[in-house]
Image (cartoon, coloured by chain):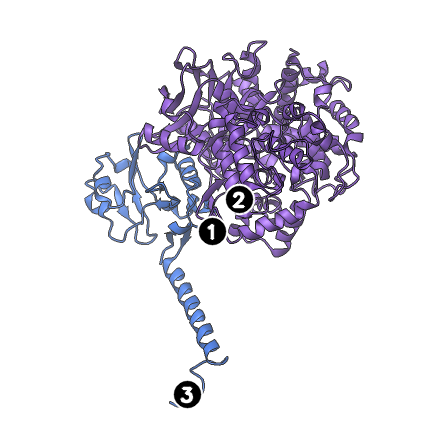
Amino acid sequence: MARTLIVDPSKCDGCRTCEAACSTATLGWCSPNASRIKIIQPQAAPFFYPLVCLQCEIPPCVSRCPTEALEKDHRTGFVKLDQEKCPGCKACIAACDIGAISMVDGQLIKCDLCGGDPVCVKFCLTGALTYADPEEVAAYKRVAMAERAMESLVAQNGGRSPAEGRDV
Amino acid sequence: MLGGYMGKLLRVDLTRGTVRNGPLPDETVLRKYLGGAGLGARILADELPGGVHPLDPQSLLIFMTGPLTGTPVPCANNTTAVFLNHETECTIGTSHSHGYFGPFLKFAGYDGIVIQGAANRPVYLWVHDGMAEIRDATKFWGKDTHETEDLVKQDVGSCEGVSVAAIGPAGENLVKGASVANDKHHLFAKGGIGGVMGSKKLKAIAVGGTLKQGVRISKPSELVATALEWRAALFNPDVWISYGTQGVGVAAIRYSPTAARLDWVRRHSERLMAVKNLSDPAFGREWARAIFRAAMDFRVTPVACFACSRGCAYAIEITSGPYKGYVATLSGGGELLEAASGMVGIMDAGATFWLADRYDRLGLDSGTAGCAISLAFECYEKGLLTTKDTDGLELEWGNADAAAQLLDKLARREGFGRLLAEGPKKAAELIGGDALKYAVHIKGAGMNLHDWRAAWSVLLGQIISGCGPCWQAPGADAFSPEPDLGYTELAKNPTSPEGKAEAVRKTQLKKLLEDSLGICWFGSWGVPGSLAYEARAIAATVGWEGFDADEALTVGERVINLERLFNMSHGLTLETDLDVSQRLLEAPTTGPATGKEFGQYIKGMVREYYQQMGWDAETGRPLIKTLKRLGLKAC
């Protein structure tokens, strides 16, 4: 499966370096307002949510786009916005449930994973942002879970696996 | 059009009640001074009229970002305040803070704010989206800095982002060593900036708004590449661990240093703890272990500044004792904890963090106020003061309640606090007897509070610093060496005079460059290659071809010389540079510097520093050929 941006909000400390790096790399201006990833602090408490396009499998922005400026590339997983085809009708902003598309200086912008080498991930200090194949991440977690279970059961069974020496 | 700069200064006249947008100086000036301390000093030197006292209405208060503030480089979040120093009264004052104030000021469209005059009633400034308003602050007067921040944010209404810098009761009462607090964790601390702001009846400055304005980057991919290399150099464990674990080791929690490294930091730091008015350095280790061991049970949350690569600031919830449940919001570092607690012999961890936060809330710098309070405690312990003098307070080492009450009195100039509000030297003169022998001060003000008698280049740096005692010349004896300047490890001889003037001079050049870039020092201190990264970052951000490390260091040297000229025109002499208290000059009787007497060598080291700087060895006046090389005119 293609790699994608994996967000862990519990690790985000709101430093906004991702916003600084994204806007600089994509627009040549450092401006959190003009970034394709946005750090949202919903209340005056230390919780920060990195809000970014999730590259949906069935993107509502793509189905709503009247000029086919938005397209899902199923090989890479990116939902790309072709500026040449985009008249700025903003239907996609209305379509996206999480607010991942925004408008800067009359132009619509959204995350396209920097074509496969996302710059925000490189700047993220805490590991709140990673770029990985979700299937690989899940597989790794399964092995880790099985190992934890094994440790616990073996310890309870006097140092031996409970499956050993069973009369089947 | 230049990258990095917004091209606008906000000009505020509080006497007339007007605000207007003004231009930055032209490009040749910007290339010579960059921003922050450098550009601030240039503007102050050019515009401050003669014969002005720091608290006069004509006194200028400048808040200046740098071209790298609000960019993706490590720790791109500095604002430097520049003004006439209220504590020394004969030098420039520079004060740094971080958090979000600087970046949000730029995203509001401004490189800096220049404030003159004084309002006739309390006001605050609201700077947003390319414009500014002067608003009534009468209802906030008297409130502490953190309450003020919350109330001002409510007053300006909900927006994309707001950062507030505010004075507390100490600044309102024109106390020596008053500071300006922002973003709950950070402080413009040194130089008595709080009193300057208080004399203008300026309670707070709020910056931000829609944050729609951006910092233009001349060569974006070059800057991104430089920033990534710089960050990689920062995460070399030998680099960050040298100082990243100050305070309660919040950075350590995040980056898992080796046990050996953590141990080195602990042993190194324990040598330098400032305790009991510097009367008993050996107590430093006992104090540090008691406090930091207990703090491990408190609940710590790291807090980041804009583009922060360090995470030194933190919130800490006290989980036991009389202050249980209180959450202190602090910046990284040991100084404020030593000042609030160690210097008066307090052994309770909860009281330590509560008191440190109290300093922030009252708007007081830990250095100056801390030294005044610890002086009072030592005078009481030695019988120079009795409860008749101290409004009934029993100033015994470890009495946290008394320290807290005394701190409040100092901030409000009440009772015995009125005396201490004048700073440690003046307070000692007023107390009389042997008090001047106990006082800890440099040029009448408090210094960054560690016991530098065990690290002579740092002490010398605090002494010759052009903005009053502060970190302007870090030396090479403590926390982190500077590989870019040839110091690959800490000096082996911290308590002898050899090589100290040179270490001070070299590190001062780099530091003043960094103070003019608009970045937090913790992104550069001791980072190998940082000088080259800084120069590349300026070239890529602003668009100046050929701006290299040599040109960058020359900026640092130029600013030091400009400050020297400014100071001498305000009365600074060799005698002022030698105005260091006896306690700092005499040999300690316990601890790692036992028997080492700094006072024997101070004159020689200062003269050596003058000579190496290209200044007259007797007077410290910059020689004409030095000024010519740097493109400066003698005042």
Q: Secondary structure at mark 3?
A: loop
Mark 3 vs mark 2: same chain? no
Q: Is residue B396 visible?
A: yes
Q: Residue furthest top?
A: B50
From the viewer's perspective, is the residue at label 3 or at label 2 nearer? 2
Q: Name the side, left or right, on which A115 lies relative to B356.
A: left
Q: Which residue is denoted by mark 3 in the rendering? A: A166
Local crowd size for mark 2, using a 10 Å CA cut-off: few (<14), some (14–19), many (≥20): many
Q: Residue B494: image x %, image y %?
A: 74, 39
Q: Colour of chain A?
A: blue
Q: Colour of chain B?
A: purple
- In percent of the image, x 42 and y 82: which residue is there? A163
Which secondary structure lies at badge 2? helix
Label 1 resides on the chain identified as: B
State if disc 1 and disc 2 touch (CB < 8 Å).
Answer: no
Decide: marks 3, 2 in contact (CB < 8 A)? no
Amino acid type at mark 3: Arg
Asked if A59 appears above or below B505 in the picture, the reply is below
Chain designation of label 3? A
Q: Residue at x 22, y 47 (%)?
A: A60
| Distance from the alpha carbon under mark 3 to that under mark 2 | 61 Å
In the depicted structure, whether residue A162 falls above or below residue A6: below
Image quadrant where one finds the N terminus of chain B: top left
Marks 2 and 1 sit apart, C-alpha to C-alpha, by 12 Å
Report the amino acid beneath label 1: Thr
Q: Nearer the viewer, residue B225 or B515?
A: B515
Residue that label 1 marks: B319
Left or right of B542? Residue B497 is right
Name the disc covering residue B351, or none.
Answer: 2
